[in-house]
Image (tube, coloured by chain):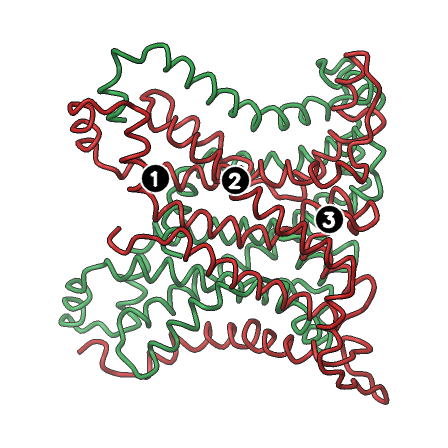
């Protein structure tokens, strides 16, 4: 009765929906359209028309060596995120759930880097990696070794990945820990009465029961890896050295806003979306969250 | 936990081992921040040479430098205007939408529901260029609104999903009783729904604020004037311009971290609870 009249419905629903249509859906579609045009500037100038160029931008994707690096780096960080972020988080969560004292403290500490902005963490690691008197080189010096250029072409990618991966472990840790704590104690008790060792308990009870949560984590890690931008941009702007540390996000930004190749930037943005959809589909078919859980 | 109970007698040694591993990881998360705070009280030359020792001589010059030359306070103000507005707008709009979506039956509800969920899949990269164009047409570049509006739209779907999950669990009886007493929809919403959703609203608020505050990408694109820089854009500039002044860098990192740290210590329960609700449902 209360919710029969439809006028309030419009008032409640419309403002938010309009915002989403104007700032998400319309730009999203326009972005697809833009990728088929040669755009001289973001806003159409009188006299300068945008010409339709069809799939030229998409063909360019296959010949541009830098986008290949960016895609490869994004895929690599995805793999690292799944193995190390979710993996380390899983081990930590299993360990923390098996202790009695200090669960709360570990949770608080592990989660902390997530609330710190990636720009601040980037700046912090810049201080670590600096050639002249950075923290790592000070340690080397103290050990009587030669300073290393940590951000040289050979090591730059790994050096960028470390803070990127490290800073988000706590996120998956908390999700997994909540999942673990939801598993009933009786299962473990029954298992150990039947003579099941700790390791077997992990494999036969814990892992099957939190498969759904793990699947969520892997999906989040994979899609999150595509959004990497702040950290690499602060530590090594513009994919330095030689574009080797470009990720899809940073490359899209560079093409659009510093090189002014706007339509190509739109194309890369679309590539990011496609990768996101495809990768999360792949994850859900491989890990398959159990419907019953 | 049960596992611990059962195996307590047999696995005393392994417990020590477990604590060692856990403490090791805890140190990796604490150490960088302690290191940077410690070094913010040293002159740059000391940071370069003895970054592990305690500050001697102890100096506040880096902080003076940061506040005098870098407009950090203005950047704070800009960030709070932007992220505060985003947070409030998202809280209001998301509660309204979630209320409509959980309480009303109407045609096209399914479509709107999938529109909301699908918009979680749009990374900011895929919408930013047309939004930038829109903003420059409206002459809003360098204006706080140019960051606020896209961020509100971007965070809305997450917030609506969390709020819908919460409101669906609320029993209808109270609203029906209020209706019997003669309350209209607006009163039901403001007097019953909003007060009852406080815990979820807190989660939504914290996350929106953090995401907006930490979003360098949108800030870089929309705000080009230095006096309008929010915190992250300023940090990025410090990184490229003052990259050799280690003391200044350390102090500005500390200045950015401390308020977040204080808020985190007070609100960490809500933050962590909200994360799980949001992530698993979303």
Residue B278: give x, y in percent of width and height: 40, 52
Kind of element beneath mark 1: helix
Residue B81: give x, y in percent of width and height: 61, 56
B62 lies above or below A115: above
The Cα atoms of the two marked residues, 1 and 2, are separated by 20 Å
Chain letter for green, please.
Answer: B
Q: Are marks 1 and 2 on the same chain?
A: yes
Kind of element beneath mark 3: helix
Q: Are marks 1 and 3 in contact (CB under 8 Å)?
A: no
Q: How many marks?
A: 3
Quadrant assignment for the N terminus of chain A: bottom left
The Cα atoms of the two marked residues, 1 and 3, are separated by 33 Å
For disc 1, the marked residue is: A178
Q: Name which of mark 1 and mark 3 comes first in the sequence.
A: 1
Question: Which numbered tag is attached to residue A233?
Answer: 3
Q: Nearer the viewer, residue A14 or A109?
A: A109
Residue A146: give x, y in percent of width and height: 84, 19
Q: Nearer the viewer, mark 1 or mark 2?
A: 2
Chain letter for red, please.
Answer: A
Kindly identify the residue that appears in the image at 57 percent across and 48 percent down. Answer: A78
Question: Which numbered tag is attached to residue A83?
Answer: 2
Q: Name which of mark 3 and mark 2 comes first in the sequence.
A: 2
The Cα atoms of the two marked residues, 3 and 2, are separated by 24 Å
Q: Nearer the viewer, mark 3 or mark 2?
A: 2
**How dense is the environment of label 3, judged by Cα within 10 Å: few (below 14), some, or many (20 and up)?**
many
Kindly identify which chain the residue marked by label 2 belongs to.
A
Q: Name which of mark 1 and mark 2 comes first in the sequence.
A: 2
Kindly identify which chain the residue marked by label 1 belongs to.
A
Kindly identify the residue that appears in the image at 50 percent across and 57 percent down. Answer: B87
């Amino acid at each position: 009765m209360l919710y029969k009249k439809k006028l309030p419905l419009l008032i409640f629903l419309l403002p938010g929906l309009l915002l989403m249509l104007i700032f998400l859906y319309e730009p999203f579609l326009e972005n697809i359209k833009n990728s088929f045009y040669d755009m001289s500037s973001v806003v159409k100038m009188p006299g300068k028309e945008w010409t339709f160029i069809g799939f030229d931008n998409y063909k360019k994707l296959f010949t541009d060596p830098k986008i290949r690096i960016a895609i490869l780096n994004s895929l690599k960080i995805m793999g690292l995120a799944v193995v190390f972020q979710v993996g380390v988080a899983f081990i930590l969560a299993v360990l923390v759930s098996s202790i009695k004292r200090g669960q709360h403290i570990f949770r608080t500490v592990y989660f902390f880097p997530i609330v710190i902005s990636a720009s601040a963490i980037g700046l912090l690691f810049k201080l670590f990696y600096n050639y002249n008197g950075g923290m790592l080189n000070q340690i080397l010096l103290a050990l009587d070794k030669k300073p290393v250029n940590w951000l040289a072409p050979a090591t730059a990618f790994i050096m960028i990945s470390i803070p990127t991966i490290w800073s988000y472990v706590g996120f998956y840790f908390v999700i997994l820990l909540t999942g673990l704590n939801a598993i009933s104690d009786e299962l473990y008790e029954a298992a150990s009465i039947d003579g099941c060792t700790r390791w077997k308990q992990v494999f036969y009870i814990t892992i099957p029961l939190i498969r759904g949560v793990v699947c969520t984590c892997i999906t989040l890690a994979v899609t999150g890896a595509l959004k990497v931008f702040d950290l690499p941009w602060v530590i090594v702007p513009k994919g330095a050295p030689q574009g080797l540390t470009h990720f899809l996000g940073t490359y899209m930004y560079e093409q659009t806003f510093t090189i002014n190749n706007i339509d190509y930037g739109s194309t890369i943005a679309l590539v990011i979306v496609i990768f996101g959809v495809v990768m999360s589909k792949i994850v859900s078919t491989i890990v398959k969250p159990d419907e019953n859980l | 936990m049960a596992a611990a109970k059962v195996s307590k007698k047999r696995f005393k040694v392994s417990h020590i081992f477990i604590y060692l591993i856990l403490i090791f990881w805890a140190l990796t998360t604490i150490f960088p921040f302690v290191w940077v705070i410690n070094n913010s009280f040293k002159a740059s030359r000391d940071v370069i040479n003895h970054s592990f020792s305690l500050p001697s001589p102890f100096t506040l010059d880096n902080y003076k430098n940061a506040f005098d030359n870098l407009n950090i306070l203005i950047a704070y103000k800009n960030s709070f205007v932007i992220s505060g507005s985003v947070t409030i707008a998202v809280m209001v709009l998301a509660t309204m939408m979630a209320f409509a979506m959980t309480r009303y039956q109407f045609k096209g509800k399914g479509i709107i529901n999938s529109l909301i969920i699908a918009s979680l899949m749009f990374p900011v990269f895929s919408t930013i260029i047309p939004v930038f164009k829109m903003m420059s047409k409206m002459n809003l570049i360098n204006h706080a609104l140019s960051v606020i509006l896209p961020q509100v739209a971007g965070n809305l779907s997450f917030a609506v999903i969390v709020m819908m999950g919460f409101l669906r669990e609320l029993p209808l009886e109270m609203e029906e009783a209020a209706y019997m007493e003669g309350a209209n929809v607006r009163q039901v919403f403001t007097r019953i729904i909003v007060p009852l959703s406080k815990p979820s609203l807190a989660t939504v608020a914290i996350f929106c604020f953090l995401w907006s505050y930490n979003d360098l990408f949108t800030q870089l694109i929309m705000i080009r004037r230095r006096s309008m820089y929010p915190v992250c854009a300023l940090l990025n500039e410090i990184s490229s311009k003052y990259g050799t002044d280690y003391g200044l860098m350390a102090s500005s990192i500390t200045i950015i971290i401390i308020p977040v740290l204080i808020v985190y210590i007070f609100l960490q329960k809500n933050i962590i609870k909200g994360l799980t609700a949001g992530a698993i449902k979303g």
